[in-house]
Amino acid sequence: MTTMMDKRVFFLLGFIMFLTLTGYGIVLPSLPFLADNLGLTSFQMGTLITGWATAQLIAAPFWGRLADKIGRKPVLICGLIGFGIAFYLLLFANSYWQLLLARMIGASLSAGTYPAVLSIVADSTSQEHRNVAIAKMGAINGLGFLCGPSIGGFFAQFSVQLPFIVAGTLAFITTPFAWKYLEEPSSVHTLIRVKTSYLKSFSMLTKRGYRELYLVTLGLSMAASSFFGLIGYFMIARFESSPGLVSIVFSAEAGTAVIVQFFVLERLYRIWNEERLKQYGLVICSIGFILIALSPHWLVAVLGSSMIGLGQACVIPIVVSLLSKLGSYGHGVTMGMNESMDSLGRIVGPLLGGLVFSANIAIPFFGSALIIVAVLIMIVLQQKKSGQSLLIENEDFKGKM
C-alpha cells in the first residue's frame, strides 16, 4: 500500500463524487414541484425522501460486500450507471407509486458509489495519510451538495424535468472516464479477511469496535437529517425568514464543513489525536444544536449551523478512517454498512423530529443535541471500562508538532 494516494486517482474520484453529489442536489428544488403536479400529499412527499434512504439502507451492504468480492471499480461503474438511471426514471413517473418506485430503484442501483469510492481511498493510502484523504473527499462531497440546488434551481426555471435530465446525463458522462482512467487498487485482494453472507454482514453491528463507530454514524445522521429537514420551518416560525435567509443557514453548515475539511483538519491532526478530536467535534456539534434551539436572533442560528458543520467535519472523516483500520472485514462491506447506518439515521431523524416539532419548534434541536451527548457519553464510558478507546487500535497521542 502506498503512503499517499496517486493524485490522478484522487482527482478522478473527487470529480466523480462532485458530479454525483451535484446531480443529487440538482433535483431537490424540482421534487416538490413534481410532487405538486402529481397531487401528492405532504406525507407522500416525505416518503419519497425516506424511500430513497430505505433503499440505500438495504442495498449499501450488498454493494459493499460485492466490492470486496469482484473489486471496487466494477461496483463504482455500476453505481454511476445506476445514478444516471435513477434520474431518467423520474421522467416517466406519472403517479405517486411510479415516482416512489423510480426513487427506490435508483437508490438501490446507485448505493454502491460512495462505499466504493471510500474503499478505493482506504485501499490506496496508508493509515497516516488516510484521515486527510477521506476528509478532502468529504469536502468535495459537501461542495457538490452546495452547488447542486443552485444549479437545479436555475434549470428548473425552464422545465421541472430538466434538472433530472442534467443530473442523469452528468452521471452517464462520468462513467466512461471512470472506466478508462480508474485503476483497481493493487492491494484490494488482501483486504478480504472475513467472508460472510449479506444477512450475516449485519452482525458487524454487534462487533466490538465496529459497533461503537456505527452508533456514532447513526447518531450524527439522525441529528443532521433532522436539522436539514426542519431548519427551514424553524427559521420561518421563529424569525419569519425569507427563502434567502434559510439558504444562508444551510450554506453556513455545509460551507463550514467544506472549509474545515479542505484547509483546517490536517493541521488539527497535528495537535490532537483522532479520539480527542472526535470527542471535541461531538461537543461542538451538540453546542451548535443548542444554540439554534435557543437562538434569539437569526445570526445565532447561523452560528449554530456553522458549529454543526465544524463538528461534523471533525467527526465523520475520523469515523470512516477508524473503520478502515479495523482489519476483520474488507473495506467494501465495512463502508457499505456505514452507509447503511447513515441511511437509517436519515429515515429515523426526520420522522422523530417531525413528530415533536408541532409541540415546540425547539424540541427537535434539543433532541439532536441530546443524541450527540448520548453518543459522547457512550464513548467516554467505553474508554473508562476498557482502559483505552475501543474506537482506535493503540494509537499514541500525537502531541503538538
Image (cartoon, rainbow, N blue to C red):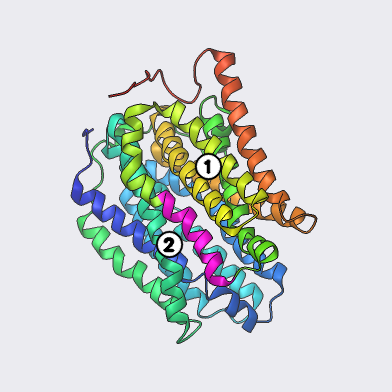
What residue did someone put label 2 on?
146
Count neighbours of disc 1 (C-alpha within 10 A) and say few if under 14, some if 14 to 19, many if 20 or more. some
Q: Quadrant of the N terminus?
A: top left
What residue did someone put label 1 on?
198
Question: Residue 298, percent across and down?
Answer: 59, 59
In the image, what residue type sits under mark 2? Leu
Q: Is residue 197 magenta?
A: no
The answer to whether the residues at label 2 and label 1 have Cβ atoms under 8 Å apart is no
In the image, residue 74 sits, relative to residue 316, either above or below, namely below
Question: Residue 178, percent across and down?
Answer: 27, 58
Element under label 2? helix
Can see residue 54?
yes
**Magenta segment:** 242-257
In the image, residue 154 sits, relative to residue 217, either above or below, namely below
Element under label 1? loop
Q: Nearer the viewer, residue 322 or 336?
A: 322
